[in-house]
Amino acid sequence: MIALMKNNALFNWQKLSFRRRLLLIMTLSGIVKLLILSVAGFAYLKHWEEQDSGNNALGIAKFLSTSPCVIKAIETNNPALIKNKIEYLRASVNAAFIVVGNKDGIRLSHPIDARIGKPMKGDDNDRALKQGLSYISVAEGSLGRSVRGKTPIIDAQGNIVGVVSVGYLLTSIESKADHFLIFLLIMIALVVLTNAVISNFTAKKFQNAIFGFEPEEFGRLYMELEVTLSTIKEGVVSIDANGNLRSINRSACDIFKVNAEDVLKKKMDEVLPENNLTDILTSKVSEYNVEMMIKGQAIVANRQILIVDGQVVGAVSSFRLKDEISELTKQLSQVREYSDLLRSQTHEHSNKLNTISGLIHLGKNEEVLSLIGQETERYQHLIQFLRDAIHEPMIAGVLLGKSERARELGLLLEIDDGSQLLALPAHIRAEDMVTVIGNFIDNGFDACISSNTPKSEKKVTVSLSDFGDEIIIEVEDNGCGLPKNIAQEELIKQGVSSKSESNRGVGLHLVNQIISQYNGQLIMESINNKGTRMTVYLPKQHANKDISNDIN
């Protein structure tokens, strides 16, 4: 049964909203603190009142012990000499009793006449009568428990002849403290009410700061975010409004070769000085596909500012190694080239098969044999030429595919008979060459299609040469030429294109990166305002720099 009640209590507690839980906790906490404070304050006040009453009592006792009439009353054992005076004084100082006793502790004065002549109660006279000390004591007397001041009475010869005891009942002292206790209880109620209002406001403010989530939900979301950041391949870092690094995921640590514990909460400019992420805190402009070098690594980053209630509170940057992005782009380019080749061949062979089928039905067997011979001869000649002149299979494949694509578009792709490209140097990748050649040829096709040149004359010429110390790639078309409204320097920037379609402006930018990577040179020329010549010079010798450190 007890276990069931505990489970129900836990269930009810968990069902309470954060605001109610905080209100309950702060209210109970305030009550407990105030109760402790009240008890401690009451005890201190009671102790202080006892001490104060004791000091007053001792002062009165010392005053009476030197009174001549008191000394005379003891010497003559005549209580009548002091009775009225003692009672008047007792009433004036609001004492519970003033007792004068002789050296044997027999009373000569007392508030109750019947107790005069009887021994004093409390058993606390010895220090005064035997040792001659003045002191404060708490003892149980005939009137009840009291705090009392005692002092000896000394005659002219210096002998102890009696004792004066002035006392205040503890019940009267406690009655004074009761008023303070009532005041404290009222304050408790007032503070609890105030505490409830403040805690409700605080809880609401806090919950608004965490977007209305309960603390458990917010904690779970935080853990989910941590796990998510640790599993994604992109590097992610975030900074606050002061430029301090607030978070860094595992991928970012691997890329920059740092430990999260060593860099967190430090200035971003100190940890990664090449990363100008803090600049967007001032500019308040997010940036995308920003290329930069950090710790010798070429990366492409996206940077987004964080805005809360209209204020910039930080920034987040995600990034990947540039080599990975380039590799993916190149692989995509290869797949597209192979796809174009297959599609062109399928289309071309389909047309030829339809033609052959029609000729067979017409009984034109000689024409069929002639057509097959022509196609076989042309295709075999191109393949044999590429096999002899171009030793890199990927480059030969892209030229063959583009040749078929040109025929499909009604264009002519002409490969210079003097072209030669033997084994590539070890530092030049065939994938990069495919990207450069394929992009130039595609641009040539687009230029020819959009030009006013007669269809029969539209062609693109390709020349490859590896004679001497450089590899030379030249692609020429008789299309519309370079755009006049865009400077040549602008054409190689990412996102700049002379075409109206979306998703353009990447090819030449990527080509320029590859050429710069190999310390090569790109020359773009317009031929009599009617055609374009793209020429690339790539040195065969390895440059004195790491290829991974691209110059943008």
Image: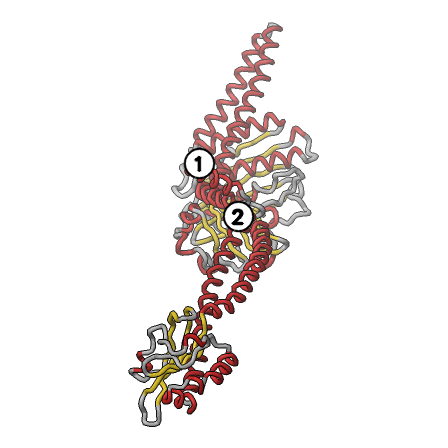
Q: Is residue 234 at all visible to an observer of this figure?
A: no
* Element class at badge 1: helix
Residue 35 location (% of width, % of height):
48, 59
- Name the amino acid type tagged 1: Leu
Q: Position of residue 140 (x, y in %)?
A: 38, 69
Q: Secondary structure at mark 2?
A: helix
Nearer to the camera, 97 or 289: 97
Q: Which quadrant does the N terminus fall into?
A: top left
For the residue carrying disc 2, how many other residues have a C-alpha within 10 Å: few (<14), some (14-19), or many (20+)? some
Residue at screen point 44% across, 50% down: 297
The answer to whether one can see residue 123 in this image is yes
What residue is rendered at 64% in x and 54% in y?
A: 310
Q: Residue at x 51, y 20 (%)?
A: 377
Question: What's the colour scheme?
Answer: secondary structure
Q: CA distance from mark 2 to mark 1?
A: 21 Å
Q: Earlier in the sequence, mark 2 or mark 1?
A: 1
Q: Which mark is residue 21?
A: 2
- In this rendering, the answer to whether 510 lies above or below 43 is above
Kind of residue sitting beneath label 2: Arg
Q: Tell me whether circle 2 and circle 1 mark residues in contact (CB < 8 Å).
A: no
Residue pointed to by mark 1: 4
> Residue 339 appears at what percent x and percent y?
53, 27
